[in-house]
Amino acid sequence: MSRGGTAAVSLLGPQEDRKDSRATEPLWRAAQVFRLATLVYAVSYQVASVSDYTRPTLSWVLVALMAVWSGLAAVGLSRNTAARRWLVAADQVVVVALMASTRLVSDQDWYSTHQTLPTTLWATNAVISAAILGGPWLGVASGAAISVASALVRGQIDLDLWRDATAPILVSVGLALGLAANTARRSHAQLERAARLTAAAEERERLGREVHDGVLQVLAYVRRRGTEIGGPTLELATLAGEQEVALRELISEQAAPSPASGRYPQRGDGDVDLRSLLRGEASTTVSVSAPAVPVLMARERAAEVAAVVRTALSNVELHAGGGAKAYVLLEDIGEEVIVSVRDDGVGFAPGRLAEAEAEGRMGVSRSILGRVADLGGTATLENAPGEGVEWEIRVRKQASGKGRA
């Protein structure tokens, strides 16, 4: 819908029109109840005023036509059909025509000081229908047009609105109902979009689990056994490992929501769910645990945290020993996240990190400590020879504006 709503409605095809109307169905049904209630008032006004008419018989004929049209319009507008817009247009014409007929059944002294034959309250139905169909602009236009028609019929064209509240009431009704209709459409569209995104996310996660439980485990097994056997199978193991990594990255990308997707509530245009990035590292030897709700983090910072975890897991694979398993735990503590990477491998001897750095091997000093320092966070290492290694990385979700981060 556009802001005014009129142009959008006129461009909708039959299928889109029916889809759009589903959001406003409660308003349409309520409007028809109001239409029938105003008909009762109009008939009672006719009973009270018929003795003052110069042509009472004709007035009853016109009231009967008004009742018939009220029934037809109530039935037609309560149904979600392509004919609804034509009924709304006809409603405007019928209301103006019945207003003009007031001059046929009464003299000037009467119609210049009283309501028109169909009553102002009943005429409001046309404004309500226009507002629900086309939004506030069409509602205001309908209210203004019917107000002018009423003033012309009664011969009271002036700028003193305080003497006649017809125009302010009709225009206000058109504006209020039009805004309500547009709000209903936006809410309905957001609800449908959220439902579609949720269904798509659940399907991706289901497929991801099936792939992980089947293909990824087979690839990991081929890689491990091929490496153990060696010889001609080493090339097969290498290819299986490459495909395993590529498939994990693909699953991670499919699970990660884009900033503009609207899948999760976001704190900024560059926020992503850190859980999705870390779950891409899961394998038969790596277990990833994360909160049940999204952990939103600035995109660049999340990518750096994922790179730190990837480096730590690479060290586990290279140095923790055969059969070692790693465990990644993500915690959300408000403004910060804590990521723990623990393994049950052999650990390393005291002083080994300093020796590795002196030898030019910068995996820990640059890939882990350097990245965490750039993010303004802290990285703590606990090592127990024979029992494994544990990293605890603590960083803020959003850049604080201090330092390089």
Image (spheres, rainbow, N blue to C red):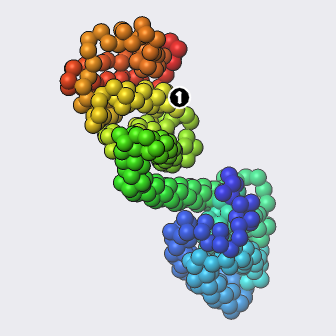
Residue position for label 1: 300
Q: With respect to residue 245, does 338 lie above or below?
A: above
Q: From where the camera sits, is residue 14 visible? A: yes
Residue 344, image x and y in percent?
Answer: 24, 31
Image-quadrant location for residue 353? top left
Give the secondary structure at mark 1.
helix
Residue 322, image x and y in percent?
Answer: 29, 34
Q: With respect to residue 177, does 97 lie above or below?
A: below
Q: From where the camera sits, is residue 245 visible? A: no
Q: Quadrant of the N terminus?
A: bottom right
Residue 289, image x and y in percent?
Answer: 31, 40
Relative side of 311 to 331, left or right: right
Residue at 67%, 77% in the rendered image: 82
Residue at 44%, 15% in the rendered image: 361
Identify which amino acid the numbered label 1 is placed on.
Glu
169 or 92, which lies in front? Answer: 92
Q: Characterize the local packing of mark 1: few (<14), some (14-19) or many (20 or more) Cα atoms within 10 angstroms.
A: some
Q: With respect to residue 58, does 4 lie above or below?
A: above
Q: How many marks?
A: 1
Relative side of 361 to 225, left or right: right
Relative side of 155 to 78, left or right: right
